Image (tube, rainbow, N blue to C red):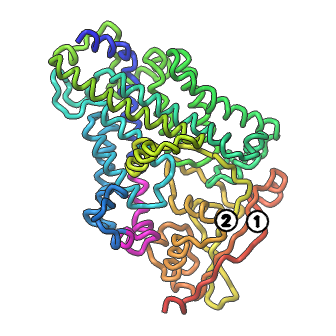
Amino acid sequence: MLANVKILSKFNNYTIAFQLIGRLIGLNCLISFVSLMIQLPGLIGDHGLFPVSTVYKDIGIIGGNICLCPSLIWLAPNLTTALFLCFTGSILAFLTVLGYLKGFVFLLLYILYLSITKACGPFTQFQWDILLLESLFLCVFLYPFLPGLKNDSTNKFNMQQPNPFIWVCFWVLIFKLMLSSGLCKITANDPTWTNLTALYYHFATQPLPNPLAYVFNQLPHIVLKCGVIFVFIVELILPIFIFTNSKLRSFTAFGFIALQVIIALTGNYAFFNLLTISLCLPLMNDSVLQKIIPEKLLTFLNITIRNNNTKIDNIASEPIFKIRLAQTFKLSVAIILTLLSLVKILSLSGFIYQIPLIETIDESISPFCIANSYGLFAVMTKARPEITIEGSYDGINFKEYTFKFKPGPLNRMLPIIAPYQPRLDWQLWFIALDENNISPILKNLVYGLMLNYKPILNLIDYNPFLDKPPNIIKVSIYDYHMTNYKEFFKTGNYWYRDNKRDYFVVSQKKFK
């Protein structure tokens, strides 16, 4: 028992991070659930872009399909079920923000969010969605699973120190995220990364640029090259120091946070930056966080700081066999998750999947998103094709639909919307990159506009055909380019566009 207490006491100076990270992961979950709930009718409703009732209608439960697509939506594949899951998840996530940090709550959040990500298909397959799932899964084992433990004086806010094995899993997670993001840039053989020119294009071609992206796009090339070097240092070198000592770990955390702040200031990446910064907290001990976080804020959040001399009453009062059983279980979980993460990192080299057993295990757990691959900005997009949709009554005079946040009007101010994510606007960025194929989502979007379906109209900003749907809809693609300062002060435009080409045209006759 003393050995167990000694091991745990080494992580006794991470009590602030321990009490904060669950709240912050819960906050990310709350943001995602609420923002999805607003968009779900247009995304997966019966008249939406990816109707969940249609998608699940022809999929049988027999044959292990539930394991291939694990989701509570199987119980009743409709919009009402999805909204209920989001609402329930929002309530539970809000409880964790308040400080109700229990393993069973995070388990429910994991199940609910996994269900929603599967139900929404391509709209929730972003790296921050799977990163949130992996983080929620770790929190299941980090905190006491059930309320009412012995010596838990508040019975609501349990102030135990973190379990060292699960705490190290958080180190492994941020290590995997950052190192994989760096390695993928090397292994993708994209010349813009190797010749340090990636940031020449990034700010103008990213999915949803914000005002500072416009400013950064005007920076001298030498500054942008230095920015690429900084990215490589943060993603390829700093992760190594996670497993050294506390000072270097803290330094590494500040490097990670600095990169995330820059990304957040120059782009709208939903809750990704907030979530990644949250995952940096386990790298910083109490002495570091006390210097950063105001004492009044810690008091307001009801966060207590355990010193190294504090007796670990909860541990000492438990029977030895229960302590050993719990520690053995969490150690086993930590070993399995760490090995799976190692496989994901090694897979970037391509040789690990030559081992059949590894490949089988990876395929089996992949649908559950508990050990994921990451690789941000592996290939830099050098051009910016944008989909435009126009409608007409006579086939001669066309009026353009306007989306809420993606580039459209040339003089419209670039948006600041993170951590909210407009899932349709994001999806259209990906669709525009593949001009050789017409996405079913784009077809459903045009169909909804042709019939003036309200759930779909709620996803866009301006519909020029409120009284009567158009007879013809024309979909085109333009190449968008950011203007420079001289052009901006002359025209007031953030963008100019050229090289228009027709994508497809549909008419009301097809729907009659």
Residue 167, above or below 307: below
Q: Residues within 10 Å of mark 1 (few under 14, many from 20)?
A: some
User: Where residue 63 sits in the image (x, y, percent)?
Assistant: 30, 63
| Dominant secondary structure (helix, strand or loop) of the stretch shown in magenta | helix
Residue 418, above or below 176: below
Q: Is 43 contained in the magenta span?
A: yes
Q: Residues within 10 Å of mark 2 (few under 14, many from 20)?
A: many
- Rendered residue at 52%/35% (across/down): 176
Give the camera-side residue of 384 and 400: 384
- Rendered residue at 44%/26% (across/down): 282
User: Where residue 196 sits in the image (x, y, percent)?
Assistant: 77, 39
Check disc 1 and give the amino acid type. Arg
Q: In the image, which residues are magenta?
A: 33-55
Circles 2 and 1 in contact, beta carbons < 8 Å: yes
Quick check: can you spot residue 2? Answer: yes
Could you say whether the residue bearing mark 1 is in a helix, strand or loop?
A: strand
For the residues labelled 2 and 1, the Cα–Cα distance comes to: 9 Å
- Rendered residue at 52%/86% (across/down): 468
Check disc 2 and give the amino acid type. Glu
Q: Earlier in the sequence, mark 2 or mark 1?
A: 2
Q: Report the residue marked by disc 1.
A: 497
In the rendered view of the protein, which quadrant contains the N terminus? top left
